Image (cartoon, rainbow, N blue to C red):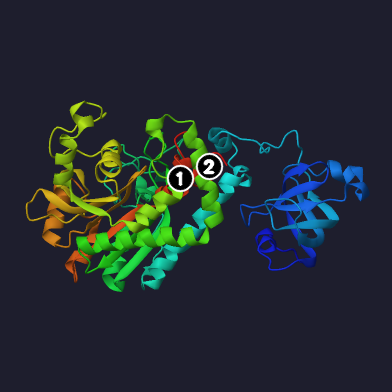
Amino acid sequence: MKHTKVKNLLNSETTISEVNAKGWVRTFRNNQFIALNDGSTINNIQCVVDFENTPEETLKRITTGAAISVTGALVESKGAGQKYEIQVAKLEILGDSDAEKFPMQPKKHSLEFLRENAHLRVRTNAFGAIMRVRSVLAFAVHQYFQEKGFVYVNTPVITGADAEGAGEMFQVTSLPLDNLPKNEEGNIDYKKDFFGKHTNLTVSGQLEGETFAMALGQIYTFGPTFRAENSNTSRHLAEFWMIEPEVAFNDLNDNMDLAEDFIQYAIKYTMDKCQDDLKFLESRLAEEDKSKPQAERSEMSLLEKLNFVLENNFKRVSYTEAIDILRDSTPNKKKKFSYIINEWGADLQSEHERYLVEKHFKCPVILFDYPANIKAFYMRLNEDGKTVRAMDILFPGIGEIVGGSQREERYEVLVEKMKALGIDEEELWWYLDTRRFGSAVHSGFGLGFERLVLFVTGMTNIRDVIPFPRTPQNAEF
């Protein structure tokens, strides 16, 4: 008999004389009540065992974590909390779980303990909910862009280009590390490497994405990116997923409109599809808040925060205006910021970004027109010669969630900027070609997918919203 998903059984319109369900035991009470979960929903289905007619040996094997198959009647539940339960006529143990050794016992575990057991943590309510939300959010990303006629482009994971110019890249090589070939100058001879040149894991698909936008009009990428940045923080990963749309003929204002519309769509879609999971995560966050000092507690519940983003236009503020606000702010004057804002040109830190969003404007903020010298080479220079058409979207609790810009479409200006930064023109000859042949105004942005998942789930550590986090000194699993 084919098994039915627990979600479908719980949503059934009627009782059913015989059903089969398969899943993992969450709890087994009084030798009679099994809470069964198969990952299709946050909710368990109660399976009632006739313990008097079930062999003692079988009852002993019904332990937390065991995989089982139950067959019986789907009936209205006598207990509170669920509409239906299964009266078990036949039970089969598919896979035993040693109750003494199984780490995911039905009790509260610390997030750090769960990270150490990332291969099993998805069997908990919280991580099951997070990963279902992540899956739906990922689908919403594709649905949004596909509905708007964007072309999905798979940009390379291995590349010779450093899109950000930060140099924090993972090198890719097949050379023997214990016997590296050297050239006549005594340097590593990359001509003998697999690709015949120095290559890395990508930090962004943007540059390649731009070339496709200049032929297909509007494209998006959604794939893994890598930063060899030694940041052991709750906001950074060495491997994460990026969403990067690029649109020909869009200026910075169009870019801001697109980013705002996209984020609101993805959040709304997920709220519609993941109601049970988000309600659970909301109560989890409220419980976590109780242990924090009053000043650190969320002013809004999770669902209130999500609705707040949907119902409020993002405030658009120039970098120059933001600097004035920060310079005159109480935490800056009282030296409460770790990085004091003294003058125009400062690179904003997450504490500044969160102050603007959470304390000053109390809504999502789009900052634009940043100083050229703190932004990447490909951003369009403004007429003032000192700022670029860059934008960052700042969210409560997160800080920067999107970074984007109108791209520098003028060949001569782009070459000058590359020379000033010491970027090799020969390395990026193909990128410069897009400015030689039919260049036009175009814009795009990058959204770190995990930061969006972080916001939607209410989690506070980015390691908890990706299946297997990659961080400094940690590539377990």
Label 1: how many Cα within 10 Å (few below 14, some 14–19, many 20+): many
Kindly identify the amino acid type of the residue bearing the numbered disc 1.
Answer: Gly
Q: Say the numbered circle drawn on residue 284.
A: 2
Image quadrant occupied by the N terminus? bottom right
**Placement of 405 over or under 474, stated as above or below:** below
Residue drawn at x 80%, y 44% is: 62
Q: Nearer the viewer, residue 96 or 315?
A: 315
Residue 94 spot, x, y in % from top left: 79, 52
Label 1 secondary element: loop
The label nearer to you, 1 versus 2, is: 2
Residue 29 spot, x, y in % from top left: 78, 42
Q: Is residue 38 left or right of residue 254?
A: right
Q: Is residue 54 left or right of residue 66?
A: right
Q: Nearer the viewer, residue 178 or 450?
A: 450
Residue 92 spot, x, y in % from top left: 83, 53
Residue drawn at x 16%, y 35% is: 327
Label 2: how many Cα within 10 Å (few below 14, some 14–19, many 20+): some
User: In the rendered image, which quarter is residue 175 located in?
Assistant: top left
Residue drawn at x 49%, y 62% is: 272
Q: Say the numbered circle drawn on residue 458.
A: 1
Residue 444 spot, x, y in % from top left: 28, 60
Q: Is residue 76 left or right of residue 220?
A: right
Q: Nearer the viewer, residue 18 or 5?
A: 18
Kindly identify the amino acid type of the residue bearing the numbered disc 2.
Answer: Arg
Q: Is residue 285 left or right of residue 185?
A: right
Marks 1 & 2, CB-CB < 8 Å contact: yes
Let me know if residue 241 appears in the view: no
Residue drawn at x 68%, y 37% is: 105
For marks 1 and 2, give the CA distance. Answer: 9 Å
Q: Which residue sits furthest left?
A: 384
Q: Say the numbered circle drawn on residue 277.
A: none
Q: Nearer the viewer, residue 420 or 446?
A: 446
